[in-house]
Image: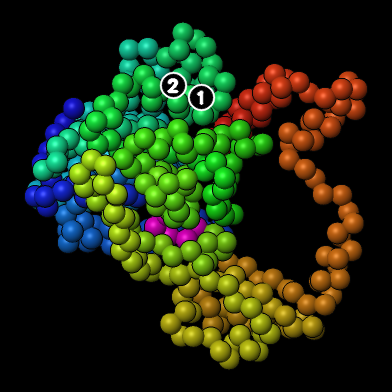
Amino acid sequence: MPKSLPRNGVIMRFFHLSDLHIGKQLHNYNLKTDQEYILQEVVDYAKELHPDAIVIAGDIYDKSVPSGEAVTVFDEFLTKLSRIEPKIPVLIIAGNHDSAQRLDYASRILGTQQIYIAGNVPEVAEDHLQCVTLEDIYGKVHFYLLPFLKPGYVRGKFDGKLPESYQAAVEKLIQREAVNWEERNVLVTHQFYAGSSQEPETCDSEVFSVGGIDKIESRVIQQFDYAALGHLHGAQKVGAEHVRYCGTLLKYSVSEEKQEKALHVVTLGEKGTAVQVEKYPLHPLRDVRRVCGKLKEILESANPQEKEDYVSITLTDDVEPYKPKEQLERIYSHILEVRIDNRRTRQLLAEMDDEEVFADPLSIFADFYKEIQGNELTEEEQKIVENVMEQVKGMENQ
């Protein structure tokens, strides 16, 4: 296990990042320039604050087969971080959007530069989670790297037996690590964690499995001194103060308009003391906003400082204006969409309320099965159907 002393000379402090989604597009706009700009701000913060580590909790890329352009953006980011002296360890795991094999490529060479990558989960009985150990005045801090997994990924670790759920798979992997809970431990993980009494906040840019079968109760990982989560795009704690999603660096959907993106800096004190999480402001090249009103009002009140932002526009004119998008494009350079919301469209929506609303795929199949067979799906049959749908979803995301 690699060891290094803290850069600040006192206590452990690290950046918590996740869901970079390099290569992502926003309504057909290429975000390369925006992503390069915000990643440079992270580099600038790293030079200023010099953390003891930089943790990236999955979804480095937006697609499992990233473009050459996306790979170059991430390569330049890592290169800039690696040039900071003294070197800052960078700890990376694969998310559900990443290709584990592609991320693992050259991981041994990168490890010599203190860039530690865990793409694949342990697949055979003798393998364990990758663990990077750093040290400060209070002793060791163990960072356990747990990439995104599905139950089928770890079948080989448990004598060919498939864990019955995502939660069971994570629980079993952690149990077999024989973690020394007397020392400080950080888990870096990319899954859908939820508190026992409250569902986490989600947004339009996130996609989850049918029926919520990928949900894991956060109590499973609460024994860690800090759990650095990736997967959800909004920053939030889950079940406990020290179990946190840091969210994305940029807004990746209009539904994230009100979210405040920030760089999360985590400080671990002595074992048993509360974790401190500081949020440093980020300054994107362009914001994502909603604009609503009559066309004339929008054109006249446009703020010059916001004209380069990504905007979703809703027009409320009762009479549809002449070529509204063409007029708006003279003011706004990055229009995501133009919607119409007036009495006529509201009436159409009201008439559609009585039409049939389709349920999720699992519910549709369950209703079909009951109609044909005359009885409900058993619990075992439902799990089989869920697993089949999960496999189909996985193929669609490739």
Q: State the SS at label 1.
A: helix
Query: What number is the disc on residue 290?
Result: none
Report which residue position mark 1 lands on. 168
Residue 250 within the magenta-colored segment of the rendering: yes
Residue plotted at (51% across, 24% down): 168
Residue plotted at (70% across, 18% down): 380
Q: Which residues are magenta?
A: 248-252
Who is closer to the viewer here, 147 or 176? Answer: 176
Residue 264 within the magenta-colored segment of the rendering: no
Mark 1, Cα crowd under 10 Å, few <14 / some 14-19 / many 20+, is some
Residue plotted at (28% across, 30% down): 181
User: Relative to 81, is 108 above or below?
Assistant: above
- Residue type, mark 2 in image: Lys
Residue plotted at (45% across, 12% down): 158
Residue farthest front in this picture: 272
Q: State the SS at label 2.
A: helix
Count of marks overlaid on the render:
2
Who is closer to the viewer here, 14 or 67? Answer: 14
Report which residue position mark 2 lands on. 172
Quarter placement of the N terminus: top left
